[in-house]
Image (tube, rainbow, N blue to C red):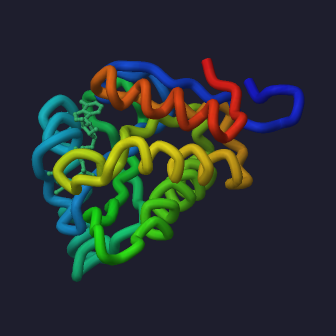
Amino acid sequence: MTDASGAPRLTLLRGDITEQQVDAIVNAANSSLLGGGGVDGAIHRRGGPEILKECRALRASHYGRGLPTGQAVATTAGRLPARWVIHTVGPVFSASEDRSALLADCHRNSLLVADELGAQAIAFPAISTGVYRWPVEDAAVIALRTVSQSPTRVEEIRFVLFDDRALAAFQQAADSLGLSAN
Ligand code: AR6
């Protein structure tokens, strides 16, 4: 359900994204699309080989050089409760170069793909805040600002945070942006 303003409902929770009962979950992938550690590893492990099969097909067709940073593409979710996985590639954090626009692109483009799929509920992890070292307090502001400013038909946007620190960072960011979240 959207709220009275038509904006998607925003939910922040601590949990494992592979367990979410939503239409689409977002994967913090790398440009190879062929798997990795962190949330990417968990999604492929629990979702089974169908996801990798579709990723390989994408590499053989549209993304011969890999998925560029900031872009997003969907596959089946295999055995996961979700219907689709939307793979996006976050930027590696850099202290010397501002890559925030690429992190924003990940969120905006994932929502565009969700709209193309007709997804009503989507779950995001804290993209780039693990192996890619983006400070979670900053990533949370970028993520929430971007989704709250992106026009979308998605009705629920859920952020599934893996630990208390990430959850607290997203709650704090929502407060600072004046966003109401459950
Ligand atoms: N559910 C929700 N969040 C999770 C889960 C999970 N099951 N597992 C980890 N996280 P990361 P990145 C959190 O490293 O920084 C991979 O190797 C984690 O605590 O998964 O974008 C890819 O293949 C952190 O807060 O993604 C790439 O090579 C957040 O998810 C690279 O890592 C993101 O951490 C991408 O790095």
* Rendered location of residue 81, percent (x, y): 36, 24
* Rendered location of residue 107, percent (x, y): 51, 54
Q: Residue furthest right?
A: 4
Q: Is residue 36 left or right of residue 87?
A: left
Q: Nearer the viewer, residue 163 or 89?
A: 163
Q: Is residue 128 left or right of residue 142?
A: left
Q: Residue furthest bottom?
A: 65
Query: From what the image shows, is residue 48 above or below residue 28?
Result: above
Q: Nearer the viewer, residue 18 or 162?
A: 162
Q: Is residue 149 left or right of residue 16?
A: right
Say which quarter of the image contains residue 4: top right
Q: Nearer the viewer, residue 117 or 105?
A: 105
Residue plotted at (41% across, 42% down): 137
Query: From what the image shows, is residue 100 above or below residue 62?
Result: above
* Rendered location of residue 95, percent (x, y): 29, 68
* Rendered location of residue 177, percent (x, y): 67, 41
Query: From what the image shows, is residue 9 above or below residue 86?
Result: above
Residue plotted at (77% across, 29% down): 2
Say which quarter of the image contains residue 87: bottom left
Residue plotted at (35% across, 77% down): 97
Count of marks overlaid on the render:
0
Looking at the rendering, in which quadrant would you find the C terminus? Answer: top right
Residue plotted at (16% across, 41% down): 38
**Ligand 1 appears in which quadrant?**
top left
Looking at the rendering, in which quadrant would you find the N terminus? Answer: top right
Q: Nearer the viewer, residue 55 or 124?
A: 124
